[in-house]
Amino acid sequence: MFHPISFFIGLRYSRSRNRSGFVSFITFFSIIGILLGVAALITVVSVMNGFEGELKKRILGIVPHVIVSEDDQPITDWQALQTELLTLPHVKDVTPLIESEALVLSNTQLQGVLMQGVMPSQEKDKIVNSQMIVGDLSLLSQPYTMVIGQSLAQQLAVQVGDKVRLVLPHKTLFTPMGRIPMQRTFTLVGLFNVGSQVDDSVVYIHSRDAAKLLRRSGDGISQLRLYLDDAFAAESVINARPDSLNYLTFTSWNTTQGRLFSAVKMEKNMMWLMLSLIVAVATFNIVSALVMVVIDKQGEIAILQTFGMTRAGIVKIFISQGVINGFWGVLLGTIIGIVLTLNLNSVIELLGVSVLGAGYSTQALPIDLQWSHVAIIALTALIMSFLATLYPAFRASNTLPAEVLRNE
C-alpha cells in the first residue's frame, strides 16, 4: 500500500499544470487513448457476444444439440429411453426424430434438404414453432403435409397450399419400370423464418409420414434429439453418459456446425487481441510521459531524497502518478463503453448507418453486455497502466541528489 506522502505528491504531480506543455500533451493523449481503447473493446466484445448468441439461438435452435441413435435402426422402446435421457445433466428435453437426406422438387426448381420427421405435439414450444410466418407445426398432423423455411420456399417458388415432391435418393423401390427412389407428394402447410442458414436446408414432416417413406414398421423412430440448457455442454453430456447407454451412438452438433462456431470464436479472440493492443499502446504512452516528468522533476526528487525520502518512496510517487492517470482513462472509458453499448442501436439509427447492408430489413445489432467481460477489460487496462509506470519510477529512484543539486 502506498505511503500517504508518496501518494499525495504523486496526486499533486498528476494535477500539476506547470510542467512542460509537451509533457501535458502526452499525458492527456495517453489518458484519451486508454479511454477510447477500453470503450471500443467493451462495445465490440458486446456485439461479438451478441452475434455468437444469435448464432447459438438460431442455428442450434434447429440443428440438434445431441442425437442419440442405435446403429440407424428403429428404437423399439424410445419412450423409456426418453425418460432415462431426461435424467442426464444439462438435458432440458428429449424429442423423437426421424432424419434423412432428401430432395424437394417444385414445378421449376430442385433443392437438396435434410428431412426431419417430428411429432408436432412434442415440438410445439421449440424455436421453429415460435418463428412460424404462416401456419403451425400442429398442421403436420394432416396426412402428407410439410413445413419449410421461407427462404427455401422462395427458391422453390412455392407458397402455402402448393404441392411439392419429396424424394429420398438413398431409399429405392423396385417397380415394373425398374429401381426408383422413394418419393411422395406433400402439401405445404407452413413457413418458418429462424433467420439462419438452415432455413433453406431443413424441412419438417410428421414422423408417421417419414416412417412410411422409409418403409419402417410402427412409428419408425430411429433417433432421439436432446435439447440442452447450453448447447456448448454437448461434449460434457456425451462424456458423462452412464455405462448403461454405451450401446447407443451419441452425436453432437460439433459434427456439422463445429467449424462455424470455431471460426466465430477465433474472430472474437482476434478482436480481443487487436483492441487490447490499442489499449496497450495507449497505456505505454504513460512511460514516455513519466520519463519526461522524471527529467523535469529531478531537482524536486533530489530535494525529497535530501530530506530523507527513500528510493521506495520515490518509486511510489511515480507509480501513484501513472496509476492515477490510467485509472481516469479506464474509469471514463468503462462508463462511455457501457453507455455506448447500451445505446448503440439508437446511435446507429440516429446516424442512419447501414451496418448490416441493404439486404437486411433491420439494422439492429445483437448486443450482449456481460459484466464479467467489462470487469476483465477494466482490470487488464489498470494492470497495464501499473506495469507502464515501473521503468520511469525506478529511473526516478536512481537519481543522485549530489549530482543534481550541484548543478542547481
Image (tube, rainbow, N blue to C red):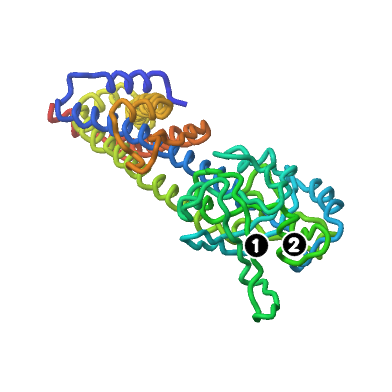
Q: Position of residue 282 (x, y in %)?
A: 29, 37
User: Does 407 sit above or below residue 233?
Assistant: above
Residue labelled with disc 2: 212
Which picture quadrant has residue 272?
top left
Extreme-front residue of the structure: 176
Asked whether 408 or 283 is in front, the reply is 283
Quick check: 257 left or right of 69?
left
Asked whether 145 or 1 is in front, the reply is 145
Say which quadrant the C terminus sits in: top left
Residue labelled with disc 1: 184
Asked whether 338 or 59 is in front, the reply is 59
Residue located at (36% from left, 41% from top): 356
Q: Is residue 313 visible?
A: no
Residue located at (59% from left, 44% from top): 190
Asked whether 381 or 337 is in front, the reply is 337
Q: Nearer the N terminus, badge 2 or badge 1?
A: 1
User: Does 319 sit above or below residue 116?
Assistant: above
Does the CB distance between marks 2 and 1 fall below 8 Å? yes
Quick one: label 2, few (<14), some, or many (20+) residues within 10 Å?
some
Q: Position of residue 308 (x, y in %)?
A: 34, 24
Q: Nearer the viewer, mark 2 or mark 1?
A: 1
User: Does 130 sit above or below residue 103?
Assistant: above
Quick check: 188 left or right of 21?
right
Q: Is residue 87 visible?
A: yes
**Residue type beneath disc 2:** Lys
Which picture quadrant has residue 334?
top left
Q: Position of residue 198 (x, y in %)?
A: 53, 52
Residue located at (57% from left, 64% from top): 103
